[in-house]
Amino acid sequence: MKVLDQVKKFTIPTAKEQETMKELAEYSLQLVKEQAAKFPNVVGVEIGGSYAKGTWLQGEVDLDIFVKLKKDTDEKTFESVGKKIGFDALKKFKPYVRYSDHPYVEASVKGTLVNVVPCYDVEAGQWKSAADRSSFHTKFILESLDQAKKDEVRLLKKFLTAMDIYGAEIAKEGFGGYVAEVLVLHYESFLGVLEAASNFVQNQIIGTPTKKFETPLVIIDPIDSNRNLGTAISAESVGKFVLSARSFLKKPSLSFFKPNPLRPNRKNLDSTIIIKFNYKPRSPDIIWGQIKRATTAISGQLELAGFDVLRKSSVTDEKSEAAMIFLLRLPKIEKFMIKNGPEVLRKKESESFIAKNHKNKLLWVNESGKILSLQDRPFHDAKLFLNNLLKKNLSESGVPSGLVSDIKRGFRVFDGRQAASKSIKKALTELTTTDGLFFSFP
């Protein structure tokens, strides 16, 4: 396919880039080895991830260096030694801590992100940390994929990246690099993966599971049949993948491999409400988890108050700014609401209901024999409701405790037309606009 031949030109690393990365990898690995040698419970240091497996993309590569500790190392020592080695090895490059299941150290070395990740030196299946599988993944992929298939993986990664569903981290909840490799291994090529994806069914199973998994897409880890790689992939990401696969197969285009600039649907902006606040520095993984849980909680509060939430989104610049965004059916609703009461024949309950609601606009008995009340809504404007909720009832809103102090320091509620920051505008565009790459029109 001519389109794929063109894509390979800006997806497969050039010879010069490969040489540059080789030098950087050797340099970074040596820095880590020098520090790791100071600790007797470290049994090895090795490079993993997409670079080691030869599936990294042109201009888009991180370097993962794994520090292997003896399996009898206690968790506290495991974390402290991992951080100590990472910080000392990368001290010239302003290192910082990030979190997965365990903390690890990251820094930008000569323009490339380098991660120093601790893991246990264990046998297959005896996992003690999530990172323990990494060296097994690297070995498995190197043994299973030839160069041609590695380039097919690159095509898939580029496709997923352009569709904005690449990455298993909580911020994205998409398809990770190892998942892309496993899919190509299973379906043999990029086009094979898309052909299969276009026909996925609910709870599609890829691989041979040893137990039942309840996720939209079940992808069994080839080195661990008890592990479902699909757990990290949201239903939304699966849906986007299936739709984009169908669209590409109908009409192949370079557009599916390049960023797709969209413009916000201005008609929908009036119905979007944004809660923006600043937070104290913390790991990106932590703030993303907190803001997503908060967005779900606030969405529930809006629904309870009578506002229909059509879509919601969470966003953070991973530095200091975060926002929750809601697309509502209507930002202002009826001033009155009907409150359902008990059946008249339930004497105690009906008398109690009448006592509490007799001052409302109207009380009546409906055709089913129930008492109903017409009353004023506490709030019919979503902005006013949210301002009141976060100022007076924040502790009962469902917002994670880790965000409460941040929101108490100050927040702002406004509509989509007032958005200024780049990250919020991007999220608004995605929330309010139909992406033609996902939906193939006749």
Image (cartoon, grey):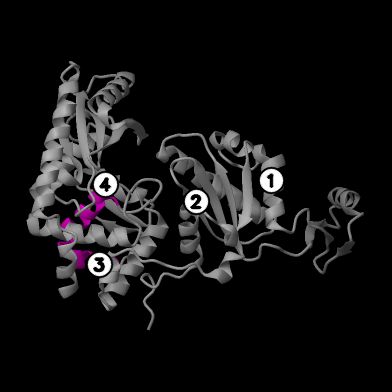
- Pinpoint residue 103: horizontal percent, then vertical percent: 34, 30
Residue found 52% across the figure and 70% down from its top: 265
Q: Could you say which is closer to the camera, residue 373 or residue 408?
A: 408
281 relative to 22 in the view: left or right: right
Q: Is residue 173 above or below residue 74?
A: below
Q: Quadrant of residue 96?
A: top left
Q: Earlier in the sequence, mark 4 or mark 3?
A: 3
Tell me residue 95's x, y (percent): 31, 31
**Near-viewer residue (107 or 204):** 107
For the record, the magenta segment spans 176-199
Q: Earlier in the sequence, mark 1 or mark 2?
A: 2
Most prominent secondary structure in the magenta stretch? helix
Query: Of the residues tagged 1 and 4, which is closer to the observer?
Result: 1
- Residue 121 visible in the snapshot: no
Q: What is the number of the mark on residue 314?
A: 2
Q: Is residue 108 left or right of residue 349?
A: left
Residue located beneath label 3 in the image: 194
Kind of residue indicated by mark 1: Leu
User: Which residue is tagged 4?
Assistant: 210
Numbered disc total: 4
Q: CA distance from mark 2 to mark 4?
A: 35 Å
Discs 4/3, front: 3
Identify the element where label 2 is drawn. strand
Q: Nearer the viewer, mark 3 or mark 1?
A: 1
